[in-house]
Each structure stands twice: as C-alpha cells, then as structure tokens.
C-alpha cells in the first residue's frame, strides 16, 4: 500500500507543529545519508548498551551541549516530553515515600494533560492554584506560595513538586516562572518547568530561573521529528533522576548497570534523535530572533482582531506564538454553510494552508512562527476573504 501526503507543500499554521518544522537542508540530509533505512539508525557503534552513551555519532556530546544550552548540568533524551515528566514524577514520588515530602504536587491550572497523567501514574495527588478565568486565564506567582503553605498545613509536609507550564497549550500564556522559582527556592520545594512549547523557541536558563527540572519537546519546539523529548537538570538532582539500574533477577543474576529505569532503560536510538542533533545549530541561532518572531505574532493577532468577530484569548499583548482566538463571526458563517464547522479548514486548504483544527469555528488556535512576511500576509488575506463571505 502506498500513502501520499495530501498536505505536501502546504503552509503549516498548527501551533503544535510550527516550532518543530525541520530546515530543508536537514530534511535532505536525513534522506541522502540513509538515516531513514533502519529504526536504530545511530546504534551501529553502540558499545555501552544505552543510546545516550553512543560516541559515533556523539550523542553523549550532544546531550552535554543540550544541558549547557539550557543552563543545566546533565541532560538525557526521552520518548517525548511526557516521558521526561514521568521521570521527574517518579523521582519525587520516591522522596515522598522516604517521608521527606507529601505525596501531593502543585501544578498550574493550565497544565498539559500529560503532566497530570504522569502524576497519576506515580500515585501523586495534584492540586492547583486558580486562574483568572475568561478571557485571560492568568495566574500569579503568589498563588503558588499560598498553595505550598496550604499543602504544608493540610499534610504536615511540603509538596513533593511544583510544576509550571512555561507556556500553556490552551491559551499560549507565558507563566511567571522566574518568580515561582524564587518562591520554590525559598520554601525548599523541588521545581519543574514544562517547556514543551518554549524550549528551542525562546531563551531559557534553568539556573537563572531557579529550576530543578526542565522538560522539553523536541518535535514541538526544537525543529525535530517525533517522538523526542529531553530532561535537563542539575548535577545534584541527576544523581536520583538518572540513577542507573541496581536490581538483579534472582535466577540469572543478570545486571543492567548502564540502564536508567526512569527513562525506561534506554531511549530513542533512531531518526528523531538524529534529526534533533542535525537541527541543533539552527535552534541555537533562532532563539536569538525570538523578539522579532514575537513582534510578527503580535502584529498578526492585531490584524486578525481587526477583521471583526474575532478576539484573542489569553494574555494581550501576547507573549508566545500560540494564538487562541474566539471566533463567533466564523461560527455564524458555519451555521449557514452546508459543510458546517468543517468549512473553515476546507477553505484554508483550498489556499494551501493547513493546521486549523477541522470542525471547529467557535475557537481556533493558530501560529505564524517561522513564516516570512509574504506567507503571513497570505494567511491574513485568506481569513479576510473567508470572513467577507458572511
């Protein structure tokens, strides 16, 4: 059976995808060098039994560069950002078992579902501070201080972890991560930032932000193929979160001393990691242009609101490329259209624009990250033409 990519050559505006688009030269490299030939593409010279220790090509050096780029000491690659979060949750669960902390964590009220699933898988309870509600959905650093005190009062112990989504996947709000980091440092609570939508998009330094654990999504924000994530931490915390296997089966007595249980022993040894290694120099360069990207995003958001019947949700002015619009004008059109809610995505696809969620017209999420002025103008013109059909 042969599959064809219907959307080849389309302009992508899906916020989950725009930060993960590979540069064209990297795409060609992956094909020309036969990296797509087998699943374990970089494991031909694996001597240690763990992909993060491979030296030809040097995954080991790459991970050290990743750690340094984000201001950390140690990094490991993982099966997506969710696996990185699981590793952290499993680590703090052990701290809770030892009696050092409670079995409760504090997560922001806009956290990605994978944060909560990782907590649930590890038997951790989740409590949240409130956000401001419609239309901004903001929250304060001070609300985290209150929650920490509340957990301490209710359980007699500090929470095992504070988790903050650097930019949330619903409204694209930028969290007060530095201010929360200071609170966690003062109260001696482990602190994790989920940077799935920001690591590789804007500058991040975990030492400056007082962050203990940074979880990353390479295929969302680091110009890489998925699934691939990274977990960056400090020397101190790496001893626990990246602790190698100690157990031996009773009959065979086998040892797995190079494997890291928290990342399921060994992580991705194929094309996602290779793509990230090849794209890393591009990622390091592009974070320096974040202010230019943000300016383009804000201008596009203003132009969309000028169409009428469209309002930006979340922080305004916005601080990230993920834009969530409330679009009653488009919804009104859909009510009289024979294709109902599918009309919008289909109209955009006629213009070779893809990424707006099919079937939705009351709310849409969109991103123009990485696009040039002509592409952004074409997208704006498309929405104008569609809105004019009313």
Image: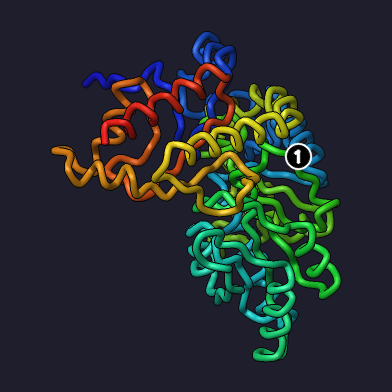
Could you say which quadrant of the image residue 64 lies in? top right
Looking at the image, the residue that sits furthest to the left is: 338
Q: Is residue 178 left or right of residue 303?
A: right
Q: Nearer the viewer, residue 35 or 289?
A: 289
Is residue 246 something that shows in the picture?
Answer: yes
Could you say which quadrant of the image residue 346 lies in? top left
Q: Nearer the viewer, residue 147 or 292?
A: 292
| Residue drawn at the location 67% of the way across and 79% of the way down | 147
| Residue 102 position in % (x across, y down) | 67, 81
Give the residue pinned by disc 1: 203
Quick check: 384 above or below 251?
Answer: above
| Residue 17 position in % (x across, y down) | 49, 34
What crowding class fits label 1: few (fewer than 14 Cα within 10 Å), some (14-19), or many (20 or more)?
some
Q: Is residue 239 left or right of residue 193?
A: right
| Residue drawn at the location 70% of the way across and 36% of the way down | 53
Name the colour scheme.
rainbow
| Residue 164 position in % (x across, y down) | 65, 60
| Residue drawn at the location 38% of the way across and 49% of the way down | 363
| Residue 225 position in % (x across, y down) | 52, 30
Q: Is residue 4 left or right of residue 383?
A: left
Q: Nearer the viewer, residue 344 or 247?
A: 344
Q: Which element carries disc 1, helix, strand or loop?
A: loop
Quick check: 19 above or below 329?
Answer: above
Could you say which quadrant of the image residue 145 lies in? bottom right
Which quadrant does the N terminus fall into? Answer: top left
């Amino acid at each position: 059976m042969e599959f064809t990519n219907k959307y080849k050559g389309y302009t992508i505006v899906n916020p989950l995808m725009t930060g993960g688009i590979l540069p064209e030269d990297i795409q060609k490299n992956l094909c020309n060098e036969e990296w797509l030939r087998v699943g374990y593409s970089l494991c031909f010279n694996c001597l240690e039994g763990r992909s993060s220790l491979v030296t030809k090509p040097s995954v080991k050096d790459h991970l050290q560069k990743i750690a340094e780029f984000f201001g950390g000491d140690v990094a490991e690659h993982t099966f997506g950002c969710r696996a990185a979060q699981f590793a952290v949750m499993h680590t703090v669960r052990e701290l809770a078992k030892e009696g050092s902390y409670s079995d409760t964590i504090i997560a922001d009220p806009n956290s990605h579902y994978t944060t909560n699933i990782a907590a649930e898988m590890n038997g951790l309870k989740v409590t949240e501070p409130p956000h401001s509600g419609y239309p901004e959905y903001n929250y304060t650093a001070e609300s985290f201080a209150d929650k920490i005190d509340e957990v301490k009062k209710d359980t007699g112990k500090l929470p095992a972890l504070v988790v903050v989504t650097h930019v949330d996947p619903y409204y694209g709000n930028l969290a007060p991560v530095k201010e929360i980091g200071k609170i966690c440092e003062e109260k001696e609570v482990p602190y994790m930032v989920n940077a799935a939508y920001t690591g590789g998009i804007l500058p991040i330094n975990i030492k400056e932000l007082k962050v203990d654990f940074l979880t990353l999504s390479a295929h969302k924000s680091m110009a890489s193929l998925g699934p691939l994530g990274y977990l960056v931490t400090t020397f101190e915390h790496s001893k626990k979160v990246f602790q190698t296997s100690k157990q031996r089966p009773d009959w065979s007595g086998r040892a797995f001393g190079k494997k890291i249980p928290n990342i399921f022993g060994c992580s991705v040894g194929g094309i996602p990691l290779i793509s990230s290694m090849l794209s890393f120099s591009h990622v390091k360069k592009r974070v320096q242009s974040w202010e230019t990207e943000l300016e383009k995003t804000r201008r596009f958001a203003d132009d969309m609101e000028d169409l009428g019947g469209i309002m930006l949700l979340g922080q305004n002015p916005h601080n990230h490329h993920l834009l969530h619009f409330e679009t009653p004008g488009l919804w009104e059109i859909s009510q009289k259209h024979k294709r109902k809610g599918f009309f919008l995505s289909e109209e955009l696809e006629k213009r070779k624009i893809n990424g707006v969620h099919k079937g939705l017209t009351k709310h849409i999420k969109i991103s123009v990250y990485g696009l040039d002025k002509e592409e952004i103008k074409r997208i704006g013109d498309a929405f104008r033409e569609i809105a004019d059909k009313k």
